[in-house]
Structure formats: structure tokens, C-alpha cells
Image (cartoon, rainbow, N blue to C red):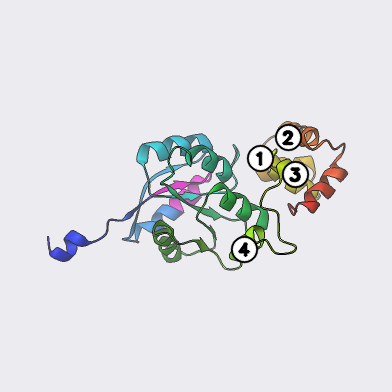
Amino acid sequence: MTAGDATAPHPVRVFLVDDHALFRTGVRAELAAAEQVEVVGEAGSVAEAVAGIAHYQPEVVLLDVHMPDGGGAEVLRQVRPRQPEVVFLALSVSDAAEDVIAVIRGGARGYVTKTISGRELADAIVRVHGGDAVFSPRLAGFVLDAFSEGPGSAPVGDPELDLLTPREREVLRLLARGYAYKEIASELYISVKTVETHVSSVLRKTQLSNRYELSRWATDRRLV
């Protein structure tokens, strides 16, 4: 071993969280060509992610935002208090402002969309591991707006909104966009009955009486 080899940095240990197995396979294949990162494990649900991160002790977690059992925000909520040293980088098909803001508030260090190339993703992983904040183009503006204190900026904290679970926020967002219950169920991979349960819970927590009031409430809080 040469002196250069002895001092070479080790690959960043990465754990992949996404509920689509085919996508995880593709990410693994893309990152396999990158010497600076190493995928040490993967998970397709919140429960698997929490257990896997504890077991494999990765340095960076690539985190999907939307999953059937709670999504990236729930993984962050459970893992960060136990393993504060782990860095999270959201990797999602969504470029919606509310999704970006939710995971950044939850503790993610960056947010990139699934249009990113394998080389760019590997570079983003290395950067967040090194302490940088990394965002796909235009997404950084959402974060600056949300956490700025200027006129018209989104509130950093909303006690009423904080009462809702990540899944309830997802259901509310789609409801406010005009989706029918069946369409929401299909979008989030849950049953219509589960959608109805979430809507009832949101109505109770917000003390509103119908979906039209909920839509106005969601619009006022920039969820739509």
C-alpha cells in the first residue's frame, strides 16, 4: 500500500430508503460506479428504514419523501433523536414546496429530485456528508422563503399545522387540490377507507366541518 492509498478517504456509507424496489435497484447500479460512495443497505418502509439505519450505521441516508406508512418525515422523526450524527438527503420525484420544507424542517440536509444523474447524486452525497446543504435547482428558493423573516414568508412554525401527521398533510394537500377520495387513495397507495379516516382526523383537529373549509385552510397555509 502506498502512502497515497493509506490516506485516501473511505467511501461514504449510504443507506437507501424508497418504497419502490426497482428504483432502489437503479440507484444502487448508478452509485456502484462512484468510488466515493458505498451503498451499505436499503429499506422500503419506515419501519425497515429505522431498523436498517440502526443496524448499518450509515453516514448518509438517501430518503424518499412519500411512502405508504408515513414517508421521509416520519423516518427523520424517529431516527434523528437516536442517531443525530446521520446525515439525511431527500431524494424524491416531488418538487412541491411543502414537501421540501417539511423534510428540511425535519432535519434533512438537502433535497434533490429523481431527475438527477448518478454522478450528480454521488457528488451530492459527498457534499452533504462534508457539511454542505444541497438542493436541486429552484428548490433552494423554497427553503429560503420558508425560513426567512421577510414580509410574505411562510411561517416557520404553525401550531395548528403541527397537529397533523405527515400522512394527514399529504391527504389534505391532495384534497385541497380537488382530488376525489379514490384518487387520493391511488396516489398514496392506501385504501379509500383510510383516506376517509385521515380526513375525519384532520377535520377534528382543525375543528372544521367540510372539505371546502379544509381547502381554504390548506391554501392559507400554502399546502396547495
Secondary structure category for the residue under label 3: helix
Query: Is residue 21 in the magenta section?
Result: yes
Residue in view at x 60 percent, y 46 percent: 66
Q: Where is mark 2, residue-wise?
A: 198
* Residue at mark 4: 144
- Measuring from the top left, give residue 175's x and y in whole percent: 78, 45
Mark nearer the viewer, 4 or 3: 4
Q: Between 9 and 44, which is closer to the camera in this rendering?
A: 9
Label 3 Cα neighbours within 10 Å, binned few <14 / some 14-19 / many ≥20: many
Q: Which residues are magenta?
A: 14-26
Residue sitting at x 41%, y 61%: 122
Q: Amino acid at mark 3?
A: Leu
Height in image: 116 above or below 184?
Answer: below
User: Which mark is first along the chain, 1 or 4?
Assistant: 4
Q: Amino acid at mark 4?
A: Leu
Label 1 crowd (10 A; few <14 / some 14-19 / many >=20): many
- At label 2, the amino acid type is His
Q: Earlier in the sequence, mark 2 or mark 4?
A: 4
* Residue 130 shows in the view: yes
Separation of residues labelled 3 and 2 (CA atoms): 9 Å
Give the CA separation, mark 2 to mark 1.
8 Å
* Residue underneath mark 1: 167
Instruction: Return the x and y of residue 224 as percentages of the image width and height.
Output: 75, 53
Q: Which residue is mark 3?
A: 172
